[in-house]
Image (cartoon, rainbow, N blue to C red):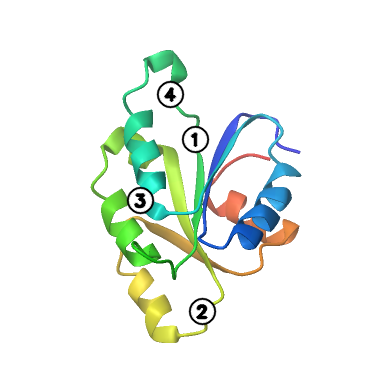
């Protein structure tokens, strides 16, 4: 169980995968918030609004887990748009792609993105989530 407040944003166009991923995360995140989005555009809108909150309501550090293949805006485009957000928002999050892709060229493209912090293959498991939190340097 996490002892510090943590913010987790989950982005996936598949409602079942999103619900399952949220259940795994809820096992660990007892303080803080978990936000789910079926579209990367909606997640970006939330992140932009979050930056406009009064200082006392700013988001706590956390992670973003985004699917790679989604309609309208895919994970590559999300990473590009995330990189354009205010630095104050970008500093708060580590962004991981959670995907079932086995395409090595796609994975290699991810490493070219400045906002990309790591890749995790689906499905998310408790062990994988703990590894991501460690990579993000979020104390459990």
Counting other residues with Cα less than 10 Å from the Cα at mark 1, is it few (<14), some (14-19), or many (20 or more)?
many
Q: CA distance from mark 1 to mark 4?
A: 9 Å
Using the image, determine if residue 14 lies above or below residue 94. below
Regarding mark 3 in the picture, which secondary structure is present there? helix
Residue 2 placed where, x, y %?
70, 36
Of badges 1 and 4, the one in the foreground is 4
Of badges 1 and 3, the one in the foreground is 3
Q: Residue at x 58, y 35 (%)?
A: 6
Residue 133 placed where, x, y %?
60, 49
Q: Residue at x 37, y 70 (%)?
A: 110
Q: Are marks 1 and 3 in contact (CB under 8 Å)?
A: no
Regarding mark 1 in the picture, which secondary structure is present there? loop
Residue 86 placed where, x, y %?
26, 37
Query: Along the line of sight, which residue is nearer the eye, 43 or 29?
Result: 43
Q: Residue under label 2, please give it.
A: 101
Q: Earlier in the sequence, mark 3 or mark 4?
A: 3
Q: Earlier in the sequence, mark 1 or mark 3?
A: 3
Q: Are marks 2 and 3 in contact (CB under 8 Å)?
A: no
Q: Earlier in the sequence, mark 4 or mark 2?
A: 4
Query: Does residue 16 appear left or right of residue 58 in this picture?
Result: right
Q: Residue under label 3, please give it.
A: 41
Q: Residue at x 62, y 69 (%)?
A: 122
Question: How many numbered marks appear?
Answer: 4
Q: Which mark is residue 58?
A: 4
Q: Which mark is residue 61?
A: 1
Residue 34 placed where, x, y %?
59, 39
Q: CA distance from mark 3 to mark 4?
A: 20 Å
């Amino acid at each position: 169980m996490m002892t510090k407040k943590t913010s987790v944003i989950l982005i996936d166009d598949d409602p079942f995968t999103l619900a399952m991923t949220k259940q795994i995360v809820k096992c660990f995140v007892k303080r803080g918030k978990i936000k789910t989005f079926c579209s990367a555009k909606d997640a970006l809108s939330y992140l932009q609004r979050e930056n406009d909150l009064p200082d006392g309501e700013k988001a706590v550090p956390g992670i973003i887990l985004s699917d790679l293949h989604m309609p309208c805006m895919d994970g590559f485009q999300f990473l590009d748009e995330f990189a354009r957000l205010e630095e104050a928002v970008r500093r708060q999050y580590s962004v991981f792609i959670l995907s079932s892709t086995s395409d090595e060229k796609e994975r290699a493209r991810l490493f070219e993105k400045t906002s990309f912090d790591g890749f995790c293959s689906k499905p998310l498991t408790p062990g994988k989530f703990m590894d991501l939190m460690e990579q993000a340097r979020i104390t459990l």
